[in-house]
């Protein structure tokens, strides 16, 4: 009797498990097989210099990874409409710094909120003089979330040679955070022997900014975490210029992000 009862109870559970696994597999397969629309490709080609410089094969890989990112992270507008251009810029910003890491995902990100303009620490984007934040990675109760200013997002791609891109900046913070601490030292991407030299290099470069002897944005001297994110913006936006002006730092970031 107990054996029959066990079988009766087991049948619906088994059906549910099989359905769940098949449904999940189908959903993932659908995501992988999806092809970016012509409009999406045109946006990447027009707006994203990093994408333009890729080979055709790498462009296809970039497109696929953008789609997979958009499948796994919810993006929503707060007081503003999020258009296809915004989706593509955000996805590109996420993929650029991790493009060399084929299996990388952002386990510490579930949701991105897009605000119309800059905001303050109370997340207000209207009627306050202290609205000076263009993007942020959430901590505490906001963990797993990112906020981006739409105006800052678009500005970041308007001039690909100014070394400034807010969205890339925030995704670099997420990469930095993956080892548990946002401190400018992504130890999970570095050999142990290179950690101390990189810390010393950051201190030297921050000192140059303070002495007005560097073209790295002054926000980089806030702390090592901000320096790492600011320098990475410059590195990905204008690598040739960055290499000329900061050869040692260029070498270090090339090794961290595995850029050839």
Image: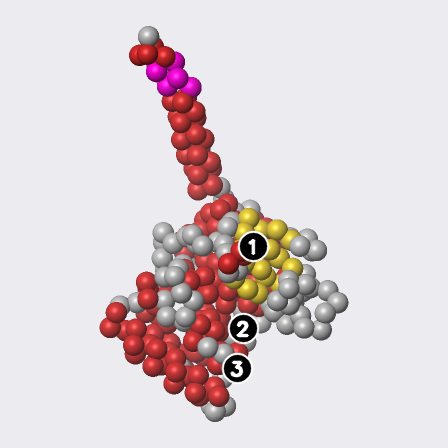
- Mark 2 touches mark 3? (CB < 8 Å): no
| Residue indicated by mark 2 | 164
Classify mark 1: helix, strand or loop. strand
Tell which circle, 2 or 3, labels the residue nearer the N-terminal end.
2
* Label of residue 112 in the image: 1
Q: Is residue 14 above or below residue 72?
A: above
Q: CA distance from mark 1 to mark 2?
A: 20 Å
Q: Quadrant of the N terminus?
A: top left
- Mark 3 touches mark 1? (CB < 8 Å): no
Magenta stretch, main secondary structure class: helix
Q: Where is residue 65 shown, x and y percent of the image?
A: 45, 51
Which of the two residues, 25 or 6, is positioned nearer the viewer here? Answer: 6
Task: Nearest to the eye among marks 1 and 2: give it.
Answer: 1
Q: CA distance from mark 3 to mark 1?
A: 27 Å
Residue at screen point 48% across, 62% down: 171
Residue at screen point 44% across, 83% down: 206
Which of the two residues, 42 or 161, is positioned nearer the viewer here? Answer: 161
Q: Where is residue 239 shown, x and y percent of the image?
A: 43, 74
Residue range corresponding to the magenta coloring = 6-12
Tell which circle, 1 or 2, labels the residue nearer the N-terminal end.
1
Q: CA distance from mark 2 to mark 3?
A: 12 Å
């Amino acid at each position: 009797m107990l054996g029959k009862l066990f079988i009766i109870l087991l049948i619906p559970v088994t059906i549910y498990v099989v359905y769940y696994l098949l449904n999940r597999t189908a959903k993932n397969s659908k995501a992988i097989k999806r092809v970016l629309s012509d409009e999406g490709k045109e946006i990447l080609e027009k707006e994203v210099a990093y994408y333009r410089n890729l080979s055709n094969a790498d462009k296809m890989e970039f497109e696929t990874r953008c789609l997979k990112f958009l499948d796994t992270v919810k993006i929503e507008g707060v007081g503003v409409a999020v258009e296809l251009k915004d989706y593509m810029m955000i996805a590109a910003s996420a993929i650029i710094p991790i493009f060399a890491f084929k299996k990388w995902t952002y386990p510490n990100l579930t949701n991105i909120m897009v605000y119309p303009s800059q905001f303050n620490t109370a997340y207000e984007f209207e009627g306050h003089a202290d609205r000076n934040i263009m993007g942020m990675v959430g901590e505490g109760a906001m963990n797993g979330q990112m906020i981006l200013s739409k105006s800052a997002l678009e500005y970041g791609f308007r001039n690909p040679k100014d070394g400034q891109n807010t969205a890339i900046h925030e995704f670099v913070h997420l990469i930095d955070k993956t080892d548990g601490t946002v401190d400018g030292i992504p130890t999970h991407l570095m050999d142990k022997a290179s950690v101390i030299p990189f810390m010393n290099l950051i201190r030297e470069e921050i000192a140059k900014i303070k002495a007005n002897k560097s073209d790295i944005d002054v926000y980089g001297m806030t702390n090592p975490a901000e320096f790492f994110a600011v320098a990475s913006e410059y590195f990905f936006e204008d690598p040739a210029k960055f290499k000329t002006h900061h050869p040692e730092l260029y070498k270090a970031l090339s090794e961290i992000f595995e850029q050839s």
